[in-house]
Image (cartoon, rainbow, N blue to C red):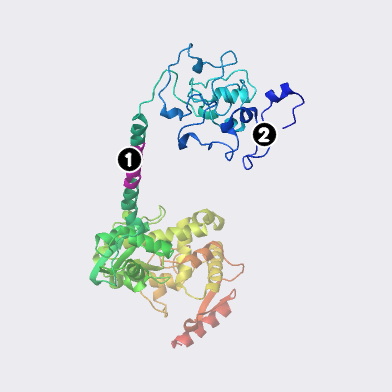
């Protein structure tokens, strides 16, 4: 805070305040009153800075003020009065303070940073203006030149003229090296990322024909690799990118596909999704077929030799432990048979499908509930399936079988007699019921030794969950319309048989 001096002694201890934007205002310093060169430029010589030429001296016969960097370093000796600091030595000519200017006082310009030309820095003046007893050197022993905090070289050292240029050249070389490294890394990244960002790809729908097999469990990258190896697409990544962009990865299926060479990745994906492109033979096995009928059908539709199907080692098919053979365990469904599939492959797929259905209905766990073994449950289901009728009739047929088993009455099921003779007919004669076979349920009580057909899942469910009722007979009176009637009276049963014979034209 600036104040008016109360006496002459206080005036020497004050630091006059002079704003930077109005240097003519405020009280004049004693240096200005004693030195005509420090007065207003209009009244005396021009005030110039060190860069404009000869510096202003504190007195007419004082030393010339020059840029400290332009003078050689004065020897640092304690006898040199111009290198002496502190209040004990004579104050050298300040930037603007005159020879009579006492230590600790400076004019406004000196406070702004004009230092002693006889020193490397003006730290002593700065310390005096701040009211310090003596200036302190920096940690490196240098003085802040002109009141600034820039460190100078240590006392007694001289900085070579070319050292700064050499340092700049090192910085330049380092910067150039770093730039070259960055460019190299950038170019390397581009080279590495290009196959992913802009992979090679063909144009159009291609030409020619080629078959590609996609194994089960293949990812989009695996499929792309197979397509690239076959010449269908130009690169693996082009196919992967298209598949991911269209979110079609989960729709790609294993199999053999008829494609073309030189296809754009989008065109290749379209063909893989088209059912007509897949090379496969679909074979549908209806419910209730016998093993002999299933093998004949598969041989015809899949193009497999019937001898190969009949000669399959049953141990290679994957049958349940309780199975005695293939009958009853070639599950009725639609199968896709691809090029290269063998007879074992086809039959194993059917046995695997049965195992899945058996797990679904809890066959092995639920068999004890009806007092049967798993094989006997399949046998009951095969008779239910062979007798026909509707899905709603299956639990009722199951109940008739269980009611007769409980009473010890022969089952008298026509389909078992026909199975024993390897025949298919709706007309069962008296002589048919007398055939000598363990499968003849007219002559033998209880269940036949094994299944007589391949049941579906609904027949398996009915065998495990029979309907509630006291029926002992059932007759499919109208096979064409799958009408089946149930009764617990033999008289009604006789009437139902006559109705059937009339519909069959045998009455």
Residue that mark 2 sits on:
17
Asked if one can make out residue 326 in the rendered structure from this viewpoint, the answer is no
- Residue 495 image point, x, y percent: 55, 83
Magenta: main secondary structure equals: helix
Residue in the foreground of this view, choosing between 111 and 99: 99
Residue lying furthest top in this view?
Answer: 79
**Can you say which quadrant of the picture contains the N terminus?**
top right
Residue that mark 1 sits on:
177
**Residue at left 46%, top 37%?**
52
Disc 1 versus disc 2: distance between alpha carbons?
52 Å
**Residue at left 55%, top 68%?**
395
Q: Secondary structure at mark 1?
A: helix
Q: Which of label 1 and label 2 is nearer to you?
A: 2
Residue in the foreground of this view, choosing between 497 and 64: 64
- Residue 485 image point, x, y percent: 55, 78
- Residue 419 image point, x, y percent: 38, 70
**Image quadrant where residue 470 sits:** bottom right
* Residue bounds of the magenta highlight: 171-184
Residue in the foreground of this view, choosing between 18 and 502: 18
């Amino acid at each position: 805070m600036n104040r008016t001096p109360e006496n002459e002694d206080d005036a020497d201890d004050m630091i006059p305040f002079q704003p930077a934007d109005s240097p003519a205002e405020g009280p004049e310093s004693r240096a200005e009153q004693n030195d005509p060169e420090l007065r207003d430029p209009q009244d005396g010589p021009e005030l110039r800075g060190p860069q404009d030429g000869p510096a202003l001296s504190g007195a007419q016969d004082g030393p010339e003020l020059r840029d400290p960097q332009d003078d050689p370093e004065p020897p640092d000796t304690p006898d040199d009065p111009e290198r002496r600091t502190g209040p004990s030595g004579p104050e050298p000519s300040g930037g603007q303070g005159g020879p009579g200017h006492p230590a600790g006082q400076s004019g406004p310009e000196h406070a702004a940073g004009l230092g002693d030309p006889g020193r490397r820095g003006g730290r002593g003046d700065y310390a005096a203006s701040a009211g310090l007893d003596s200036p302190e050197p920096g940690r490196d022993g240098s003085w802040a030149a002109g009141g600034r905090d820039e460190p100078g070289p240590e006392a007694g050292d001289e900085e070579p003229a070319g050292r700064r240029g050499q340092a700049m050249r090192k910085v330049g070389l380092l910067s150039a090296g770093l730039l070259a490294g960055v460019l190299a890394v950038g170019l390397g990244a581009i080279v590495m990322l290009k196959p992913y960002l802009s992979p090679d790809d063909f144009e159009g729908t291609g030409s020619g024909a080629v078959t590609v097999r996609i194994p089960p469990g293949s990812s989009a990258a695996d499929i792309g690799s197979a397509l690239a190896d076959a010449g269908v697409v130009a690169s693996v990544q082009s196919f992967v990118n298209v598949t991911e962009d269209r979110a079609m990865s989960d729709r790609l299926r294993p199999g053999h596909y008829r494609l073309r060479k030189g296809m754009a990745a989008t065109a290749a994906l379209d063909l893989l999704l088209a059912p007509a492109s897949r090379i496969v033979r679909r074979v549908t096995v209806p419910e209730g077929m016998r093993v002999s009928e299933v093998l004949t059908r598969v041989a015809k539709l899949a193009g497999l030799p019937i001898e190969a199907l009949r000669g399959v080692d049953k141990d290679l098919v994957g049958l349940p432990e309780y199975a005695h053979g293939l009958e009853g365990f070639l599950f009725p469904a639609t199968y896709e048979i691809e090029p290269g599939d063998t007879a074992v492959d086809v039959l194993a797929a059917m046995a695997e499908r049965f195992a899945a259905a058996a797990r679904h209905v809890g066959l092995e766990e639920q068999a004890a509930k009806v007092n049967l073994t798993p094989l006997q449950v399949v046998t009951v289901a095969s008779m239910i399936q062979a007798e026909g009728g509707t899905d709603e009739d299956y639990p009722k047929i199951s109940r008739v079988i269980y009611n007769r088993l409980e009473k010890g009455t022969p089952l008298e099921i026509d389909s078992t007699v026909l199975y024993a003779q390897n025949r298919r007919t709706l007309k069962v004669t008296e002589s048919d019921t007398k055939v000598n076979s363990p499968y003849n349920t007219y002559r033998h009580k209880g269940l036949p030794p094994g299944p007589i057909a391949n049941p579906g899942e609904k027949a398996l469910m009915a065998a495990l969950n029979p309907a509630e009722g006291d029926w002992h007979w059932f007759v499919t009176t109208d096979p064409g319309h799958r009408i089946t009637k149930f009764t617990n009276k033999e008289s009604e049963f006789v009437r139902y048989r006559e109705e059937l014979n009339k519909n069959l034209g045998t009455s």
